[in-house]
């Protein structure tokens, strides 16, 4: 189970900021054995409750500059009050998480949990949380973690009784499962500790200026033996908080009010009387996540998007500068392909075919609507999914289309990806994420070679759809989008050199990139930017319509969708779940949000609809992530921890 712990300091001139900070760090490190997947703390300085939490290890959390900022500010205010003889209070609670429910990748699932003016940490599992939510429809659920129902119920019962003890008893009478908790309420000058398992211990010194608590006696023993704690605070016996009991710790004088009978029918228990209240303190959650970023009032792009700015109405520059996508039209398409039509029914066009939704519909359109005789072409670089292969087989089999496959040295390609992923994880840099997919750019090369081998001059790509354009990938490399268009092959020559310079600088900073994949990566750059792009892009002529595309291939070919997401975009690309997890975690937006924002601008989706879809699409695709890590050959758990702890754009 998780580790919960904390310390309350009173006015004591013999204790200084360095000592107080060391105590908190020691409690964190000693509690980490109980959970290493996330860490968090709440700091109550009498005026504000500061909250900070983060997925990853305790080491990563303590290294977060925000942790140092929050702790330093609180310790500075406390020591100044002690020195000046003013009322001085400082109370800190902490949590080291072992995930039981609610993924730690979603920041709101980590602890402390903040709800309704209350801040709680919890060790245990509430097994009837779903029933409690259903029985209390007036409560609003915002996370997946079971602790949230405890916080909400405690607040609800306190507001009804103005009695923390009675409210706590009421909560414990309703829950099933294990719960050891520590909680601040924004309008009560107490720290609440309670347990129905006995997994809480506390140590209070004789002069009532120091109280520490933790999930295990051993943790407090180690604390008292470190940093001369026992000598600094004086005799400090360790006491258990027995199962079915609780206590209120007065934050001003460390007075203790103990109570028991947790879990008994509340009707048999009288109100204990309201504790001393004080003016409401602010709760400041320093854990900014992608959910609470400032976003455009028209689309859903956040403030962290490259080169983002908003006008006085809150509309982003991308919405302000957007020009409605103008396609050349079907008549122009018919005119463009007419010179290539065969007279005898022989193959007359090569259609690049990934198996994804756009290329599947494109192959259908070329065969059925244009009446041409296509050959489908796929470049398998090692990360084409089995789902994509099955969809390729469905289309080619039903359409009677020849399917030409060019396969890379797949074990070598996957090794290249692994080495670049491992290098990136050592020094995360968002613009370098595209290096993971550099290996697929040889599809341009093989399309050109196939044109020579078959004598078929016309090659159609079903990419280039402007709604699916992803300019943020070059934007994260410092290249400002001048006009919406094809992100890669549409770059101006000067920007191509700037992109090359960006990569060179990051290669110089991170020696891990100087591996055997370098030649392959340089070839990808050459094939993309240097060799002339003379392919025909289907969606430069036809308007892209997601509903028509998906409905057609689903109904006519039983095109298969992924089981771990509701999006139909990129589901045949094994890399997409991984890089979208990175973008969402570090930048607060995903590739899907970029597409959805373009759909809003084109008038095919409302902003509310886009938010709902984004919430679905942005959920981590754990089965696909595990498959990707297994195929490429890296440790997913270690990678996720490093991604979660990497510097964010927010």
Image: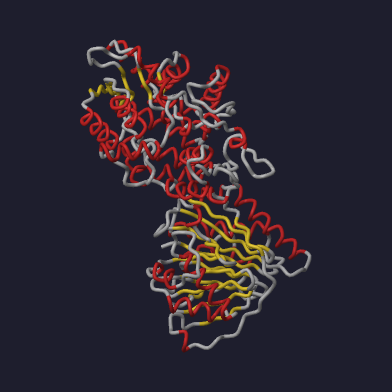
Is 575 situated above or below 380?
A: below
Image location of residue 577, percent across then percent down: 40, 40
Image quarter where the C terminus lies is: top right
The structure residue drawn at horizontal position 35% and vertical position 35%, both measured from the top left corner, is 357
The quadrant in which residue 9 appears is bottom right
Which residue: 52% across, 32% down?
431
Q: Nearer the viewer, residue 392 or 13?
A: 392
Q: Position of residue 90 (x, y in %)?
A: 65, 65
Depth check: 316 or 83 in front?
A: 316
How far from the left and from the top, in percent, is residue 62?
56, 51
Whether residue 600 is visible here, answered yes or no, is yes
Q: Is residue 308 above or below residue 403?
A: below
In the picture provided, is 122 more to the left or to the right than 549?
right
Nearer to us in this view, 155 or 481: 481
Question: As displayed, is residue 231 above or below residue 511?
Answer: below
Quadrant of the rendered image containing residue 6: bottom right
Depth check: 113 or 195 in front? Answer: 113
Locate residue 280, reporting x and y percent: 67, 69
Please identify the residue farthest to the right as the structure is shown: 84
Vertical order, 540 against 394 (above or below): above
């Amino acid at each position: 189970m998780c580790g919960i712990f904390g310390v309350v300091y009173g006015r004591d001139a013999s204790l200084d900021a360095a000592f107080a900070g060391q105590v908190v760090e020691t409690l964190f490190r000693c509690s980490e054995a109980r959970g290493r997947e996330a860490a968090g703390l709440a700091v109550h300085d009498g005026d504000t409750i500061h909250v900070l939490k983060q997925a990853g290890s305790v080491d990563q959390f303590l290294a977060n500059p925000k942790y140092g900022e929050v702790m330093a500010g609180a310790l500075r205010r406390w020591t100044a009050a002690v020195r000046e003889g003013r009322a001085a209070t400082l109370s800190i609670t902490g949590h080291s998480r072992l995930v039981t429910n609610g993924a730690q990748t979603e920041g709101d699932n980590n602890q402390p949990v903040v709800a309704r003016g209350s801040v709680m940490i919890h060790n245990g599992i509430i097994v009837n949380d779903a029933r409690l939510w259903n029985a209390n429809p007036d409560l609003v659920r915002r996370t997946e973690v079971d602790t949230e129902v405890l916080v909400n119920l405690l607040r609800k019962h306190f507001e009804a009784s103005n009695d923390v003890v009675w409210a706590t008893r009421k909560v414990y009478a309703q829950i099933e499962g294990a719960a050891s908790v520590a909680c601040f309420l924004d309008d009560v000058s107490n720290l609440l500790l309670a347990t129905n398992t006995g997994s809480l211990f506390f140590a209070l010194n004789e002069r009532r200026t120091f109280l520490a608590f933790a999930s295990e006696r051993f943790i407090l023993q180690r604390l008292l033996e470190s940093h001369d704690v026992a000598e600094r605070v004086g005799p400090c016996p360790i006491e258990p908080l027995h199962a079915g009991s609780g206590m209120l710790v007065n934050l001003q004088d460390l007075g203790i009010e103990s109570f028991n009978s947790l879990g008994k029918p509340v009707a048999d228990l009288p109100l204990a009387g309201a504790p001393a209240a004080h003016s409401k303190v602010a709760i400041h959650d320093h854990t900014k996540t992608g959910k609470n970023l400032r976003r455009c009032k028209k689309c859903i792009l956040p403030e962290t998007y490259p080169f983002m700015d908003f006008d006085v109405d809150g509309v982003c520059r991308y919405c302000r500068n957007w020009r409605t996508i103008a396609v050349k039209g079907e008549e122009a398409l018919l005119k463009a392909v007419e010179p290539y039509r065969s007279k005898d029914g022989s193959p007359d066009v090569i259609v690049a075919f990934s198996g994804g939704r756009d290329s599947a519909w494109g192959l259908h359109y070329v065969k059925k609507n244009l009446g041409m005789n296509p050959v489908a072409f796929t470049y398998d670089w090692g990360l084409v999914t089995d789902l994509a292969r099955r969809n390729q087989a469905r289309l080619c089999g039903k359409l009677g289309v020849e399917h030409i496959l060019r396969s890379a040295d797949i074990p070598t390609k996957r090794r290249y990806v692994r080495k670049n992923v491992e290098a990136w994880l050592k020094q995360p840099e968002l613009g370098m994420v595209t290096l993971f997919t550099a290996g697929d750019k040889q599809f341009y090369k093989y399309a050109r070679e196939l044109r020579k081998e078959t004598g078929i001059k016309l090659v159609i790509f079903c990419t280039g759809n402007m709604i699916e354009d992803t300019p943020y990938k070059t934007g994260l490399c410092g290249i400002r989008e001048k006009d919406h268009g094809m992100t890669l092959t549409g770059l101006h020559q000067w920007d191509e050199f700037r992109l090359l310079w960006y990569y060179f600088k990051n290669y110089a900073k991170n020696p891990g990139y100087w591996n055997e994949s370098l030649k392959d990566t340089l070839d990808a750059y050459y094939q993309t930017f240097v060799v002339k792009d003379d392919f025909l892009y289907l969606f430069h002529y036809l308007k892209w319509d997601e509903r028509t595309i998906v409905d057609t291939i689903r109904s006519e070919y039983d095109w298969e969708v992924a089981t771990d997401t509701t999006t139909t975009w990129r589901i045949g690309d094994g890399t997409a779940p991984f890089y979208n997890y990175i973008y969402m975690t570090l930048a607060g937006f995903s590739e899907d949000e970029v597409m959805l924002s373009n759909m809003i601008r084109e008038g095919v989706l409302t902003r509310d609809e886009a938010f709902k879809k984004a919430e679905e699409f942005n959920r981590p695709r754990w089965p696909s992530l595990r498959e990707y890590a297994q195929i490429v050959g890296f440790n997913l758990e270690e990678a996720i921890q490093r991604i979660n702890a990497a510097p964010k754009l927010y």
